[in-house]
Image (cartoon, helix red, strand yellow):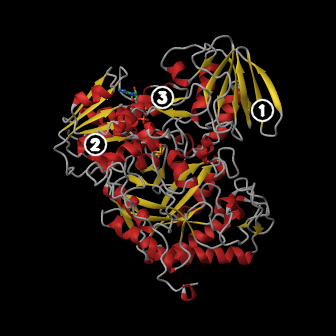
């Protein structure tokens, strides 16, 4: 397909200080869970983006001092030459693909938990962090000077390690942003009070870093131009700061929000439309003629070109869109627009990278696996057993992903069969839950890819039993039959089913019965019982409320949807449910369900009774494994299972599992994942002579 000349503007080079970006695609800093602890994973993850055509690829936040120790989170560090060596692996890998490497030098200030170093975190004033609830040390002038000097040392190391772009980062209410913030900065000396005083440390740091490395590296400044109601500055002061510091900056990297309200920056699609940040960051041009990069989960070339043409930004920044598809620039350049694996805005990457300490992505199974499993997002080897036919039973996310990988690996024939009228499994209906429409991209992108594979056929409306599987005569069989929400309320809290919970009764319902079978809750009062703490309980509650039911969400979790806190949706979601008039009862569960009411118990042992006409059970899912077990028991060779049919899990992990089997279908035992490369400290360095 020929590339559309409308998008040529995206491929123009941009000068930033002494460096030139080859085009306008810019990977802004984002977390991975790799830091300096997993240098090879870090390097390979960033290198793939460079290969995919991004002009610049940056690290995550990288602290400059040991009193900015981010543990329990994993950040990069540039404290000494050992860190430099680990990060230099990244610059070399990125340069090999023609991209510039950026390092987001930072200091956490009040937010740093310093769990490892046990040092008191320095901050403008002794005001507890709104994010970590740590009460910091008020910085003395000596502390300020020392941190500026640490920043310069880290910048020099960065330059020596091959970084092209050095950040003086104060975004997301980190230390320099705290200095700027009237909430965090209540000083009465020359660093507090007026905007000029609050900006002083940031400007001193910019000047010192520029003096040290400005002729070799581009100096980037990342800031929240509006804290959007959080602790920081609002747009008028944000723009004024840009004017004040402009002479020291080669690239403005702008966003909104603070670390506690990071949800407004890395906005989930449930609440934020693509490009929402432009309402604020679209004004930065009023304050500077220097290059500007912004973000907003942008995935379509039309929108990107429109933004550049409007002149508000010079560069299209991306974190999530390039995690979901590291090859967006190359695909646009080649005119392969439909192949772009567009981010769905679920923020599972945030949960996995930050809280779970190893990045992963719902859309892109290869994210985070580039080094340790050698998975490339666009390259697939021909399978050693490509002369075999494969039957995949179940076209949910796991089955579809496996079919794509096997199709690309050149298997002679891949039959993907599903009992439903259309492929997609749970991704057929989850996007119909309130706010989750963008999740439909999971299904539509996969269907688009499958349609391009001549060796893959999809059959729907065909339910396969063991006899049908045998009769199909495939050499290899993959069972991907998924899982369903339990109809008996089984759960890990009461460690069993709930007496009276029986989804064959009119007043007890499961999510699938509501979404697929058209079963309606009787009466006006519904209780959703959620023991999972993710999107389904809240989704059911909002759906039924929208249909006019009085809804109470009862959850055994410490709050409604705690997993949504990891995806930055939690606080907004709970406020949203509250505003809709949905009742919420946390740390409680039901011990008996009957027609018209239920009994329950709280974490503290108090019992309660509730009246309701209907009960929706979101307690746990149960694998649909009968077909697999029957085939395995009959001793059939070459039968494997993937996805929720093995164990119910996140969509991201079901897709990952399907991808894994496809990648390893020609391994000695495809049922058993190949060992992955682990990065761990060795014993070769003598601890007594280790560098201090
Ligand atoms: P996963 O997340 O593991 O991909 P899903 O539950 O989303 O699982 O999808 C499983 C799919 O398998 C559903 O679309 C379902 O219709 C299909 N399925 C289940 N059992 C059979 C069967 N015996 N024959 C054909 N398709 C089946
Ligand atoms: Fe986008 Fe979700 Fe992937 Fe993150 S995990 S990049 S939000 S699709």
**Image coords of residue 536 (percent x, y):** 57, 31
Q: In this view, does 234 lie to the left or right of 306?
A: right
Q: Nearer the viewer, mark 2 or mark 3?
A: 2
Q: Residue lying at the far top in this picture: please name it.
A: 523
Quarter of the view holding residue 613: top right
Question: Mark 1 falls on what kind of element?
Answer: strand
Q: Nearer the viewer, mark 1 or mark 2?
A: 2
Q: Where is residue 140 in the image (x, y as percent from the top left)?
A: 76, 74
Looking at the image, tell me whether mark 2 or mark 3 is earlier in sequence order.
3
Q: Mark 2 points at which residue?
A: 638
Which picture quadrant has residue 413?
A: top left
Note whether 183 is above or below 167 in the view shown. Answer: above
Marked residue nearer the N-terminal end (3 or 1): 3
Helix, strand or loop at mark 2:
loop
User: Which quarter shows the C terminus?
Assistant: bottom right
Label 3 beta carbon less than 8 Å to ligand 1:
no
Instruction: Using the rendered view, name the quadrant where residue 677 is placed.
Output: bottom left
- Residue indicated by mark 1: 601
Near-viewer residue (681 or 101): 681
**Left or right: 56 as drawn, with respect to 120:** left
From what the image shows, is residue 217 above or below residue 343?
below
Q: Mark 3 points at which residue?
A: 431
Looking at the rendering, the quadrant in which ligand 1 lies is top left
- CB within 8 Å, label 2 to label 3: no
Query: Which x, y percent locates residue 468?
Result: 28, 25
Picture mark count? 3
Say if 672 sits above or below 64 in the image.
above
């Amino acid at each position: 397909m020929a590339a559309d000349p409308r998008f040529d503007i995206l491929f123009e080079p941009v000068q930033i200080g002494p460096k030139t970006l080859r085009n306008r695609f810019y990977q802004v800093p984002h977390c991975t869970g790799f830091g300096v602890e997993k240098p090879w994973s870090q390097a390979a993850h960033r290198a793939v983006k460079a290969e995919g055509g991004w002009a610049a690829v940056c690290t995550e936040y990288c602290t400059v001092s040991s009193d900015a120790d981010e543990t329990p989170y994993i950040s990069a560090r540039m404290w000494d030459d050992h860190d430099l060596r680990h990060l230099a692996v990244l610059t070399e890998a990125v340069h090999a693909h023609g991209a510039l490497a950026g390092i987001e030098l930072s200091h956490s200030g009040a937010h740093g938990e310093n769990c490892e170093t046990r040092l008191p975190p320095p901050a403008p004033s002794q005001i507890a962090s709104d994010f970590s609830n740590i009460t910091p040390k008020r910085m003395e002038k000596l502390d300020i000077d020392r941190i500026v000097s640490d920043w310069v040392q880290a910048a020099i190391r960065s330059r020596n390690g091959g970084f092209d772009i050095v950040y003086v980062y104060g975004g997301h209410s980190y230390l320099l942003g705290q200095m700027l913030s009237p909430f965090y900065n209540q000083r009465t000396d020359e660093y507090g009070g007026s905007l000029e005083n609050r900006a002083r440390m940031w400007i001193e740091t910019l000047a010192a870093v520029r003096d040290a490395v400005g002729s070799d590296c581009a100096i980037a400044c990342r800031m929240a131009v509006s804290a959007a109601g959080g602790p920081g500055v609002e747009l008028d002061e944000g723009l004024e700061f840009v004017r004040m510091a402009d002479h020291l900056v080669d690239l403005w990297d702008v966003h909104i929000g603070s670390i506690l309200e990071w949800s407004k920056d890395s906005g989930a699609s449930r609440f934020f439309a693509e490009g929402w940040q432009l309402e604020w960051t679209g004004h930065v041009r009023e304050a500077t003629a220097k290059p500007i990069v912004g973000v907003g989960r942008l995935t379509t070339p039309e929108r990107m070109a429109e933004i550049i043409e409007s002149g508000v930004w010079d560069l299209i920044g991306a974190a999530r869109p390039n995690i979901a598809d590291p090859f967006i620039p190359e695909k646009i350049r080649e005119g392969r627009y439909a192949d772009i694996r567009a981010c769905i805005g679920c923020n599972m990457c945030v949960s996995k990278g930050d809280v779970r300490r190893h990045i992963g992505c719902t859309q892109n199974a290869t994210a985070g696996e580039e080094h340790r499993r050698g998975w490339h997002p666009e390259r697939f080897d021909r399978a050693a057993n490509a002369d075999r036919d494969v039957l995949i039973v179940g076209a949910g996310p796991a089955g579809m992903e496996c079919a794509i990988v096997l199709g690309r690996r050149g298997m002679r024939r891949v039959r993907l069969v599903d009992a439903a009228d259309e492929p997609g499994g749970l991704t057929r209906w989850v996007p119909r839950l309130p706010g989750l429409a963008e999740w439909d991209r999971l299904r539509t992108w996969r269907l688009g890819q499958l349609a391009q594979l001549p060796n893959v056929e999809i059959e729907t409306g065909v339910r396969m039993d063991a006899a049908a599987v045998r009769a199909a005569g495939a050499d290899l069989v993959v069972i991907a039959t998924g899982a369903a929400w339990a109809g008996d309320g089984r759960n890990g809290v009461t460690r069993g089913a709930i007496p009276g919970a029986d989804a064959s009764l009119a007043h007890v319902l499961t999510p699938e019965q509501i979404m697929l079978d058209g079963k309606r809750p009787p009466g006006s009062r519904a209780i959703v019982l959620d023991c999972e703490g993710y999107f389904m309980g809240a989704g059911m509650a909002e759906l039924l409320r929208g249909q006019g039911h009085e809804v109470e969400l009862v959850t055994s979790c410490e709050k409604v949807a705690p997993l949504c806190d990891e995806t930055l949706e939690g606080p907004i979601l709970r406020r949203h449910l509250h505003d809709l008039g949905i009742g919420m009862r946390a740390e409680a569960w039901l011990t008996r369900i009957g027609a018209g009411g239920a009994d329950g118990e709280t974490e503290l042992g108090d019992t309660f009774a509730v009246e309701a006409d209907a009960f929706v059970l979101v307690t746990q899912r149960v694998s649909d494994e009968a077909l697999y077990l029957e085939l395995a028991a009959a001793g059939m060779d070459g039968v494997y299972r993937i996805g929720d049919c093995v164990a119910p899990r996140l969509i991201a992990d079901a897709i990952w599992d399907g991808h894994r089997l496809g990648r390893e279908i020609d391994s000695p035992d495809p049922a058993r994942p190949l060992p992955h490369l682990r990065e761990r400290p060795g014993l070769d360095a003598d601890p007594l002579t280790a560098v201090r």
